[in-house]
Image (tube, grey):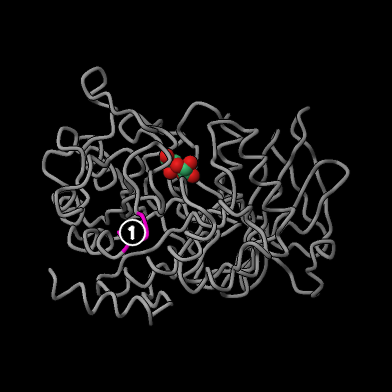
Amino acid sequence: MLWKTAPLLALVGQVLVLENGLLRRPPMGWLAWERFRCNIDCEEDPENCISERLFMEMADRLAQDGWRDLGYTYLNIDDCWIGGRDAKGHLMPSPKRFPNGIAFLADYAHSLGLQLGIYEDLGNFTCMGFPGTTLDKVVQDAQTFAEWKVDMLKLDGCYSTPEERAKGYPMMAAALNATGRPIAFSCSWPAYEGGLPPKVNYSQLAEICNLWRNYDDIQDSWSSVLSILDWFVDHQDILQPVAGPGHWNDPDMLLIGNFGLSFEQARAQMALWTVLAAPLFISTDLRTISAQNMDILQNPLMIKINQDPLGIQGRRILKEKSLIEVFLRPLDNNAYALVFFSRRTDMPYRFHCSLSQLNFTSSILYEAQDVYTGGVISGLRALIPIRTPASGFLLTLKSRFGIFL
Ligand code: GLA
């Protein structure tokens, strides 16, 4: 181990960019936090506590229920897995809840064609009070994760100062690089600095992190979705240009399948996250998810749009007095995804807008497809007639010939 540490320390000083070539498309997978939080009571609640069993069961579901084959390949542990450090300072999982260790879980995930993500916190403690990665532990912890064959690290920022974060995040990026194992790096750094310049340097972030949390934690409610959406839209001029292949804004997890969203709201979150080129991290119980919610999350055209190779984040381009908003994301092959989003609370609304209002000025005919129903409208030249569901939306995609709706 010693012989490895010296060259690594030297490298940390020099290599400040994350040249891992990972996440050319927004990551997709399952993340424990929103649904399972810090439930560590395996005696009372063995099925739902943060434990090896929970992750193995979710891995089985990801592999067997179609998720993996659609691209949901990350199985991500969040807070509350840590048991402590051994005499040499190596991180250890809770021996009771992860009796076979994290390497075992990584092997299990890999055997099913999945990838394992893990969580730590740059600071004295994780947000829930477990041992964190202080600056002197960055290299050692990066090595530990690589030895365990972990594929993604979410590095949180509780219990640290801005100065420590300014040192620690680039240091961790370099330390991960130096392990030689490709480990995607998810940074919570900007969320701890208010998410905006000048405190946040997005050019630097794009060099050292594959994705980053910009803003508050999502909670299981529509108001939480809206507050995150509003913040992203208010700051879209700053945030939209910094996203792209290998480096993504992360508005946080999908709530779909949990308790707080209606059917239309669940469809709206999926469409909005898709058009924002957001990571698609499901955080629900895949053992009991309904067929209806599975359909939303497993919509192949939706996923194709989210994973579009150009990796351009969409923007809100229209905000109508009628409380209808339109979002647009340019896609590969001359196509576009459009979200017609209604903030109305009365009833479904009949909304007409002209193609030129959406900046489609060419005189060619467009074709549109509704991503949820599959319905196609061809021959659109001037107007798009849309019936937005209550608090919902329609998502459209333009092909070489036009818009799908
Ligand atoms: C912070 C993060 C969340 C989650 C919790 C865990 O609040 O933003 O996503 O990881 O910590 O304690």
Mark 1: amino acid: Met
Q: Quadrant of the N terminus?
A: bottom left
**Left/right of residue 321 with respect to residue 153 in the rendered view:** right
Which secondary structure lies at badge 1? strand
- Residue 139 vs 252, above or below: the answer is below
Please name the residue shown 49% across and 74% down the image: 207
Depth check, front residue: 26 or 352: 26
- Residue 113 vs 67, above or below: the answer is below
Q: Main secondary structure of the magenta part?
A: helix
- Residue 353 vs 181, above or below: the answer is above
Q: Which residue is mark 1?
A: 152
Residue 77: give x, y in percent of width and height.
32, 45
Does 136 lie within the magenta span?
yes
Does 383 lie within the magenta span?
no
Residue 27: give x, y in percent of width and height.
42, 59
Residue 73: give x, y in percent of width and height.
32, 55
Q: Residue furthest top?
A: 44
Quadrant location of ligand 1? top left
Please name the residue shown 33% across and 28% down the image: 39
Depth check, front residue: 246 or 183: 183
Q: Quadrant of residue 291?
A: top left
Which stretch appears magenta? 134-138
Q: Residue furthest right?
A: 321
Depth check, front residue: 99 or 281: 99
Residue 63: give x, y in percent of width and height.
25, 48
